[in-house]
Image (spheres, helix red, strand yellow):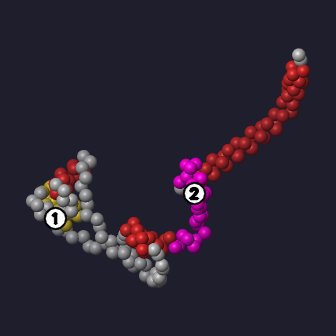
Amino acid sequence: MANLVPPLDDSRSYIYCPACAKMGNGQVEMKRDTYQFKCPMFHSYSYAEIQRMIASGQVVEMVPTQIIENPLDSAIPCKIFLQPETWKAAQTKWAGRFHITVENLFALAVSDSVIYIEGEDVKELRLRGVKTGRDVLAALKAMQELERERDELQKQLSQLMPLLKPILAAANGVESVERTAP
């Protein structure tokens, strides 16, 4: 079964009152009455006013959606051991999608689609500006392009070498005469 979002309540606006937020009470939710939004402190806004506020850059905070997370029907429960601070941080960071995130992390860890880079290698990559897999691929592609260009230039040089040998020989002869002159 997939994650569930509770049914929306037509009387709720799912928006916190901007006027109350300015006065320091940012958690007052407005109720909806067709195209009017009203808070319990008697502030009232039309839908158009809310849209203008958003367009002008004013913060109009929405009430966070509560997601009821359900693991997939095929998932099995298992017991793992974690440090309490790790458990708490994971629950906070992945709230509403904890089970699917952990499942995906485990799936990636056992697949062949992940390359692990750790320790000093990570530090060196970051110092060189590499932060993502895309950066690694871009660097490899650039290296391959440089190798291709080098090979092309070496090919051109080998083709020009029969013409350059007499010139280089003459130049070497002149250099050796100049060096031996007093």
Report the mark closest to the observer, 1 or 2: 2
* Whole-percent x, y for residue 79 in the image: 47, 82
Q: Does the magenta stretch include residue 115?
A: yes
Is residue 111 depicted above or below 43 in this figure? below
Residue sitting at x 16%, y 64%: 31
Q: In this view, does 122 lie to the left or right of 62?
A: right
Q: Quadrant of residue 2?
A: bottom left
Q: Name the amino acid, label 1.
A: Lys
User: What residue is drawn where x is 24% and y is 46%?
Assistant: 56
Amino acid at circle 2? Val
Q: Image quadrant of residue 4?
A: bottom left
| Residue at the far top in the pictured view | 182
Could you tell which of marks 1 and 2 lies nearer the N-terminus?
Answer: 1
Q: For mark 2, what is the residue?
A: 122
x and y percent of residue 60 in the render? Answer: 24, 55
Is residue 114 shown above or below 167? below
Mark 1 lies on residue:
31
Q: Give the residue at x 22% y 52%.
A: 51
Can I make out residue 100 in this image?
no
Q: State which region is magenta.
A: 106-131
